[in-house]
Amino acid sequence: MSSDNNVQLYIDGKWRQTADTLPIVNPANEHVIGQVAVASTSDLHDAVVAAEKGFRIWKRTSPAQRAAIMLKAAALMRERQEEIARSITLENGKPLKEGRAEVIRGCEFFEWDAGECTRHYGRVIPSAPGIRYIVLHEPIGAVAAFSPWNFPMSQPARKISGAIAAGCSIIIKASEETPSGVVHIAKALEDAGLPAGVLNLVFGVPAVISEYLIPQPQMRMVAFTGSTAVGKHLTELASRYMKPALMELGGHAPVVVCDDADPVAAGIASATRKYRNSGQVCTSPTRFFVHESIYDRFKSAFVEKARSLTVGDGMEASTQMGPVANGRRIEALQALVDDARARGAQILCGGSRLHNRGYFFAPTAIAELPDDARALQEEPFGPLAIINPVSSIEEAIDKANSLPFGLAAYGFTRSAANVDRLMQGIESGNLSINTLEASVAETPFGGVKESGIGREGGAEGLTHYTVVKTISHQID
Ligand code: NAD
């Protein structure tokens, strides 16, 4: 699959080296730690042919056999947890503990979808005598999928497991910056006996790959996780060829902290979650709207926790927050902080780059930021939290809904009446109360508004990878 950290393509069941490569950089020290293959048009052509061949084999493979291969691959990845986690930390920067948790989460997607594929039932519609109406869910075909760098293993896992559980084949372009996670998935599936062509792995220039794959008639669907801007572009491209698009895009998650919440417990829990993966999570809690009666106590608890975090190389056991994944994030975060400062906001902690080497940015919290400040309008996608006071839950809900995003949202309250107001009022695909976990394998996950189209995970997850066929059968 790779030698000396030279990551190869995986096409039609074979690993393939290319002439062109791109460097892989460790964000903790900026050292080049490997090379990733760059697919040519001819490689992409071969991947499409392989995916079409793989689909023909796989759609005729029984759900029980598909599930067995998926479960075997998950078991292998659990055995290889440490090796996979280390590759994630070296390429993405997150603490090793988070890398280990990510591997388990990726395995859980395979395990859930393996079970789900054996019970993805069609139905028989009640009919007049002599005729029978049957509804079948058939796999849609070969899927073109694109996954990002923030969860190098669990993000591609969710797409691959959904597609192959449904009986589809898939060509996935994972992130060139963090390629090893998906390579481990391909290796585990290969070792578990996945037929050649069902999963194909390519890397290269993202726009070249998407613009080649999406128009190909063999590719029947597009699945993407990443920024709203790129998601819109790929959705336009897919619609030009009348292909469905499953889009998991940006968020800017609001957290409504009600007057009856425990401000210290909520503050500590929020800061702990905020800085996970250095805040580079589409569900990261970011816009805190805290009732004015508990605002100061929440803020103190949050900032105390943020300041206590040890920031360093994710490979070191003491590290609680690693670097951000690349230099682009440093520039984006600094611009948001500078804008906040210019508008008179309070920088409660952090606000700048750390250390001389590596892409480290301090855990940052900003208070009393005006609504039109950039950090309140644009997803920071980094270790930056905004904590603003509100005088009522209604004001908090209005502010929460004021952006074009609606992926994850959170609330802290002990009142059933407040829970009901949040459930009715918040515009988001996922709402979590008194917990900052937005989704698990068995729950559907996805956005409303510009945060995306469709759901991954849960019983809904397989639906997008299938098409409905209605059979009308005149019996005599
Ligand atoms: P980006 O939008 O350039 O890239 C995001 C991902 O999309 C990358 O994996 C990239 O390879 C891929 N991509 C980019 N252009 C593409 C194209 N034309 N065709 C196919 N794939 C393409 O941004 P970035 O600098 O890598 O990340 C910045 C922003 O992306 C963040 O601010 C965040 O909003 C968003 N993001 C979101 C998620 C998420 O989980 N929803 C993950 C990563 C990044």
Image (cartoon, helix red, strand yellow):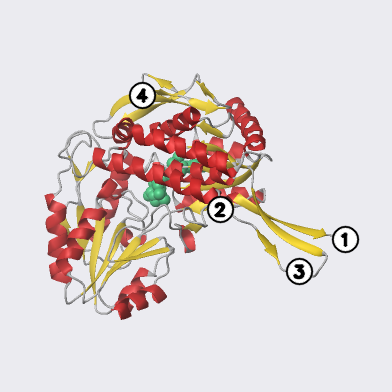
Observer-side mark, 1 or 2, equals: 1
Question: Closer to the camera, 255 or 83?
Answer: 83
Residue occupied by mark 3 = 127
Residue occupied by mark 4 = 34
Labels 3 and 1: the sequence-earlier one: 3
Dot 2 crowding, Cα within 10 Å, few <14, some 14–19, many 20+:
few
Q: Is residue 47 above or below residue 365?
A: above
Q: Secondary structure at mark 1?
A: loop
Residue behind label 2 places its C-beta within 8 angstroms of ligand 1: no
Residue occupied by mark 1 = 476
- For image coordinates 55% across by 40% down, the residue present is 66
User: What residue type is disc 4 on?
Assistant: Gly
Q: Is residue 333 left or right of residue 306?
A: right
Q: Is residue 139 left or right of residue 174?
A: right
User: What residue type is disc 1 on?
Assistant: Asp
Q: Which mark is residue 119?
A: 2
Q: Is residue 28 left or right of residue 239?
A: left
